[in-house]
Amino acid sequence: MTNTITTRRQAKARAMELRAEARQQGKSLSHARALEAVAHELGYRDWNTASARLSNQSEIPLQVGERVSGRYLKQAFNGRVHAVRELAGGLGFEVTLHFDEPVDVVEFESFSGLRQRVSAMVSEDGVSWDKTSDGVPHLIVQREETFLV
């Protein structure tokens, strides 16, 4: 776990994990002590030093050229990332994907609407905020090799 922590957000999440582990063992661990423990795991003298050194930027969930899979308008796809742009303030990302095979986005049997290149705004987790009328996200994208959403 510690070798994958590169941001303050991840370090704070690890501190929360440490607190949960302590609770399971019937022990009490304050958030401040948990942050200090994470700093020591990462090789820093204290939390202030770790916090100053760790990036406060959100991670880029996808990179140009990377293989991805997921669902677009309820249809499974495989493809590549064509473009990624961070939204203002790191709120999320606009991604453009090029599917290996066109995806039929129309649910009616009488006609088709094929799409091979699409753009959408997604969270850090690769899930779009826009949803279909029944509440399903328009796009769920994940790296193929790690199968992360």
Image: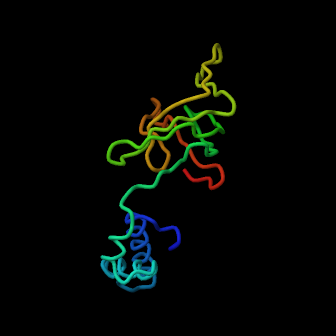
**Residue at the right extreme of this rendering:** 101
Task: Name the side, left or right, on which 86 lies relative to 142.
Answer: left
x then y, percent, for residue 46 = 34, 82
**Residue at the front extreme of this rendering:** 53
x then y, percent, for residue 84 = 49, 41
Q: Is residue 135 above or below residue 12?
A: above
x then y, percent, for residue 124 = 45, 50
Looking at the picture, tell me which residue is in the foreground, 51 or 24: 51
Looking at the picture, tell me which residue is in the foreground, 83 or 78: 83
x then y, percent, for residue 81 = 58, 40
The colour scheme used to paint the residues is rainbow
**Residue at the top extreme of this rendering:** 110
At horizontal 63% and vertical 25% (from top left) the residue drawn is 104
At horizontal 40% and vertical 80% (from top left) the residue drawn is 44
Looking at the picture, tell me which residue is in the foreground, 64 or 70: 64
Looking at the picture, tell me which residue is in the foreground, 69 or 135: 69
Q: Is residue 87 above or below residue 58?
A: above
Q: Quadrant of residue 52?
A: bottom left
At horizontal 39% and vertical 74% (from top left) the residue drawn is 15
Q: Is residue 5 above or below residue 112?
A: below
Task: Name the side, left or right, on which 50 lies relative to 140.
Answer: left
Count the marks: 0
